[in-house]
Image: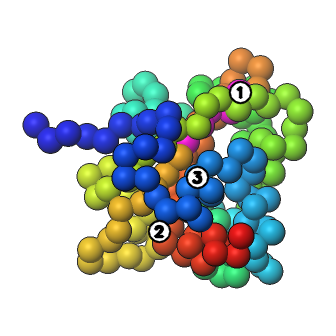
């Protein structure tokens, strides 16, 4: 049986280089950081549906799922995959359903009621279901790279949203800006 990578509490194995590790460890909003490094920022919504979460995210029931690309100057730099903890998450569910083309980070990091859980890290290879989604969203074909990702749970009252952010190769162009 092949060993499957697991989410880790620290960046230890095959650690990414300095600029990328700084992005992975960013304690605040990635949206805000992207805005500091580009002239034009856009959230491209790929899908927002009720769907079965990934095996390492939650149970078997269908939950609200949102997938977006964060683009800087027209170039995708982050693929974000978010899952609500329950089908009915009260205020959080209403906000989630009304985001449209706004970033989820614009809500999570500005509303005082949110509490962020610990950040976990993983290298996403071609065997992980998010790898296929990232490659399809970015029209990558052939030998697609392994991606670094992070995830954390944001809590509001009795609801929460699990946010996974996959860093695309173009993030290196932003990372070099400091």
Residue at 87% x, 43% y is: 110
Residues in magenta?
151-155
Q: Residues within 10 Å of mark 2 (few under 14, many from 20)?
A: some
Q: Nearer the viewer, mark 2 or mark 3?
A: 3
Location of residue 3 (image quadrant):
top left
Q: CA distance from mark 2 to mark 1?
A: 28 Å
Location of residue 116 in the rendering, given as x and y in whole percent from the top left corner: 70, 32
Residue at 75% x, 51% y is: 29
Is 134 magenta? The answer is no
Location of residue 173 in the rendering, given as x and y in whole percent from the top left corner: 60, 78
Q: Which residue is mark 1?
A: 155
Question: Quick check: 69 above or below 6?
Answer: below
Quadrant in the picture for the C terminus:
bottom right
Q: Residues within 10 Å of mark 1 (few under 14, many from 20)?
A: some
Q: Which residue is mark 2?
A: 137
Q: Nearer the viewer, residue 23 or 163?
A: 23
Quadrant in the picture for the N terminus:
top left
Query: Which labelled disc corresponds to residue 24?
Result: 3
Is disc 2 in contact with disc 3, using a CB cutoff of under 8 Å? no
Q: Nearer the viewer, mark 2 or mark 1?
A: 1
Tell me which numbered mark, 2 or 1, is placed earlier along the sequence: 2
């Amino acid at each position: 049986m092949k060993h499957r990578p697991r989410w880790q509490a620290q960046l230890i194995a095959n650690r990414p280089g300095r600029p990328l590790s700084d992005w992975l460890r960013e304690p605040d909003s990635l949206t805000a950081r992207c805005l500091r490094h580009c002239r034009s920022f856009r959230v491209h919504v790929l899908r927002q549906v009720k769907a079965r979460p990934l095996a390492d995210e939650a149970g078997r029931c269908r939950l609200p799922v949102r997938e977006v690309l964060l683009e800087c100057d027209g170039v995708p730099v982050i693929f974000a995959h978010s899952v609500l903890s329950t089908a009915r998450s009260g205020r959080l569910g209403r906000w989630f359903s009304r985001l449209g083309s706004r970033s989820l980070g614009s809500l999570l990091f500005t509303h005082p009621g949110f509490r962020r859980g610990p950040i976990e890290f993983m290298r996403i290879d071609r065997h992980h279901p998010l790898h296929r989604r990232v490659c399809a969203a970015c029209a990558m074909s052939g030998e697609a790279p392994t991606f670094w990702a992070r995830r954390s749970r944001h809590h509001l009252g009795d609801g929460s949203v699990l946010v996974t952010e996959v860093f695309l190769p173009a993030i290196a162009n932003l990372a070099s800006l400091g």
